[in-house]
Image (cartoon, helix red, strand yellow):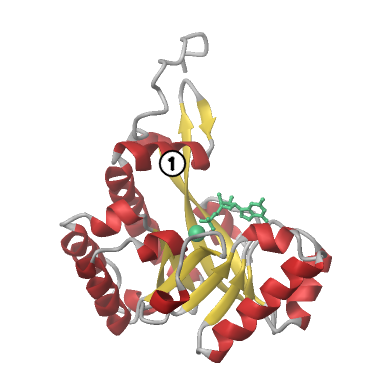
Amino acid sequence: MYPSAPAPQNALHRVPAMGDLHLEYQPLIQLSNEATVGFEALSRWTDPVLGVVPPETFISNSEQTGEIVQLGHQVLALLKTEFPALLTKYPTIRISTNASTTELNAPDFAEHFSIWLKALPPNAAHHLTLEVTETSLMQLSEVAVAYLHTLREMGIQIAIDDFGTGQSSLARLHTLPFDVIKIDKSFIHQLHQPMAFEIVRWVITFGQRFGKKVVAEGVETQDQYDMLRTLGCDVAQGFLLGRPAPLAHWLALP
Ligand code: G
Ligand code: MN
């Protein structure tokens, strides 16, 4: 809109205007039958001056400033408007959304999230997954952990995002509420190396023995996909299987 206007120095240190933020959805594919079993909702910011701002940039900046709470509210507001159409088109899926430590520990998170849930279709809880990074999960207040237990009782799944890169202690992990482990993409990208392969194999075995579903993130090649199938991984996500795309793209598919 204003192509020659210089970007303000601190332009990235703010939350996108609501109109500049949109969601894209990336499919999650079940390895046993190649069915689409879910979508991860990802926030994308296209600024009129700055162009596309990478999510890693604005998410980590807003985490530092605390504006992530407001960003989280914006994401939930967008998801509320798009969720019904996606679920109507794909009635058996789970839609996942990400929440950071700051958001989950915010004193009004439970209240805000509960109000948000009530505005969704009646069975929505059984079609939702909340993704929390491994480090985040370890940093949650007791109140936030208790609320995650409540969400699980309602049917919402909790997924540990970027598993393997965070700071979890196994002593604490087994006491925390979660249903899904998402193996960080860095391990998947190195699957051809013996060490990464063994780590991935271990996470799949460990997760499944405890009744958790295991998702491989960042699957980019057929080789990675085949190895994960051989290892008995439950679900895969990555550019090989589908790039994040706006709602309209997924609704237009036959
Ligand atoms: O940490 P989390 O799983 O929320 O990260 C999701 C991010 O990873 C998204 O921004 C998405 O665009 C990116 N992503 C998704 N699939 C792939 C992939 O196959 N390779 C890489 N490098 N990034 C991916
Ligand atoms: Mn995620």
**Tag 1: amino acid:** Ser
Q: Is 152 on the left or on the right of 180, as rendered? A: left
Q: Quadrant of residue 105?
A: bottom left
- Give the camera-side residue of 54 and 124: 54
As drawn, 155 above or below 25: below
Residue at position x 68%, y 62% in the image: 187
Q: Is 247 on the left or on the right of 188, as rendered? A: left
- Give the camera-side residue of 176 and 33: 176
Q: Is 197 on the left or on the right of 18, as rendered? A: right
Residue 71 in percent (x, y) is at 33, 44
The answer to whether the residue bearing label 1 lies less than 8 angstroms from the nearest atom of ligand 1 is no
Q: Residue under circle 1?
A: 60
| Count of numbered badges drawn on the protein | 1
Residue at position x 21%, y 59% in the image: 109
As drawn, 52 above or below 136: above
As drawn, 14 above or below 119: above
Residue at position x 83%, y 67% in the image: 223
Q: Is residue 100 visible?
A: yes
Is the C terminus in the top left, top right, bottom left or bottom right quadrant?
bottom right
Label 1 crowd bin: few (<14), some (14–19), many (20+), radius 10 Å? some
Residue at position x 60%, y 62% in the image: 184
Q: Is 125 on the left or on the right of 51, as rendered? A: left
As drawn, 199 above or below 58: below
Residue 174 in percent (x, y) is at 42, 81
Residue 155 in percent (x, y) is at 34, 82
Residue 181 in percent (x, y) is at 52, 73
Secondary structure of residue under mark 1: helix
Q: Is residue 219 visible?
A: no
Q: Quadrant of residue 144?
A: bottom left
Q: Quadrant of residue 177?
A: bottom left
